[in-house]
Amino acid sequence: MNIKNKKKIYLNCRRSMRELDFLILFFEQEYDNLFYEEKRAFYHLLKFNDHYIINFLTNYKTPKNKNLINIIKLIQTKYLHNKIIKT
């Protein structure tokens, strides 16, 4: 799968946890406007298991990749509104 195959990326946004359904919304509303590196980071994020994604989005764990950190911050800012993020 590559970052230009939007159908497969969309399907990978569908997670087993309903708490992550906003990833579909992020994809539908933001993906086309992302820079290349942001698209790669989002694609990379979708490769993680659900519990890792939740841990990243709640700041329980921090990934080592800077681009991954940036896309997580973008998702948090646009879709989580600090509701589940630890401060």
Image: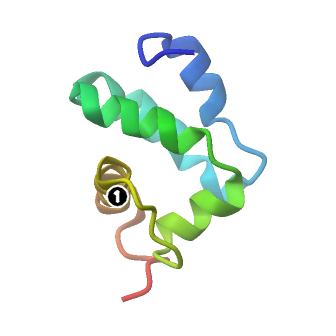
In the rendered image, which residue does mark 1 sit on? Answer: 69
| Percent of width and height locating residue 3 | 43, 19
Direction from residue 74 to residue 44 in the image, left or right: right
| Percent of width and height locating residue 64 | 41, 61
Direction from residue 54 to residue 39 in the image, left or right: left
Residue 34 sits in quarter: top left
**Above or below, comparing residue 46 to residue 60 in the picture:** above
Q: What element carries label 1?
A: helix
| Percent of width and height locating residue 16 | 78, 47
Residue furthest toward the right? 16
Task: Tell me the crowding category of disc 1: few under 14, some 14 to 19, or many 20 or more residues within 10 angstroms, Cα based.
Answer: some
| Percent of width and height locating residue 85 | 44, 78
Q: How many marks?
A: 1
Task: Pick whichever, 6 or 24, lies toward us.
Answer: 6
Residue furthest toward the front? 64
Residue type of the residue flagged with mark 1: Ile
**Above or below, comparing residue 19 to residue 44 in the picture:** below
- Give the residue drawn at x 42%, y 11%: 4
Q: Quadrant of the C terminus?
A: bottom left
Task: Pick whichever, 15 or 59, lies toward us.
Answer: 59
- Give the residue drawn at x 39%, y 39%: 41
Colour treatment of the image: rainbow
Q: Quadrant of the N terminus?
A: top right
- Give the residue drawn at x 58%, y 69%: 55
